[in-house]
Structures are given as C-alpha cells and as structure tokens.
Amino acid sequence: MHSNLIRLAKADSLPLCKSTLYKWKHLGKFPQLFIKLGGALFVDLNVLDEIIEAGRLRGRRNSPSTSRRGVQ
C-alpha cells in the first residue's frame, strides 16, 4: 500500500484536531499512524482513514438507537 503522508504541523484540513493527533503521538496511541522524518512529524492519511472508519463501525455496533429499533 502506498503511503499518503502529510506533515502534521502544516495540516489544517484533517478531520481531527492537530492537538488530538499530537496527544495520540505523546500517549503512544496508533503508532502506525505517525512517521518521523528529519525531525518533522508526518501522519499517514491512509492509516488515519482506517482508524476513523473502524471507529464509525464500532459506534454503529454499540449505538443504543440501533438496538432499540431492532437493527443489528
């Protein structure tokens, strides 16, 4: 899979706040998401998309509104 990298310091169009991504890096969450090159921190957008999609799917499975309607 081809990496789609964006420099975090200059990324203003991400679906998450830069502060959230910096916090994840500091806490060691999703280490596959971050790549450090020459002192600059990059985010792999392909991995970020996978993380967001997994969260959406998990949210749908655990959603109380879907279980009340009998939707699985």
Image (cartoon, rainbow, N blue to C red):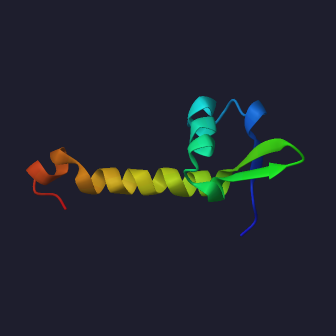
Viewport quadrant of the C terminus: bottom left
65 vs 18: above or below: below
Q: Nearer the viewer, residue 8 or 38?
A: 38
Viewport quadrant of the N terminus: bottom right
Kindly identify the residue that appears in the image at 55 percent across and 50 percent down: 29
Q: Position of residue 64 (x, y in %)?
A: 17, 46
Q: Nearer the viewer, residue 11 or 25?
A: 25
Q: As drawn, which residue projects farthest toward the right?
A: 38
Horizontally, is 34 left or right of 61 in the view? right
Q: As drawn, which residue projects farthest toward the front?
A: 27
Quadrant assignment, res 24: top right
Q: Position of residue 11 (x, y in %)?
A: 72, 34
Kindly identify the residue that appears in the image at 60 percent across and 39 percent down: 21
Kindly identify the residue that appears in the image at 57 percent across and 53 percent down: 49
Horizontally, is 71 left or right of 43 in the view? left
Horizontally, is 55 left or right of 34 in the view? left
Q: Position of residue 69 (x, y in %)?
A: 10, 51
Kindly identify the residue that appears in the image at 64 percent across and 54 percent down: 33
Q: Position of residue 8 (x, y in %)?
A: 73, 38
Count the marks: 0
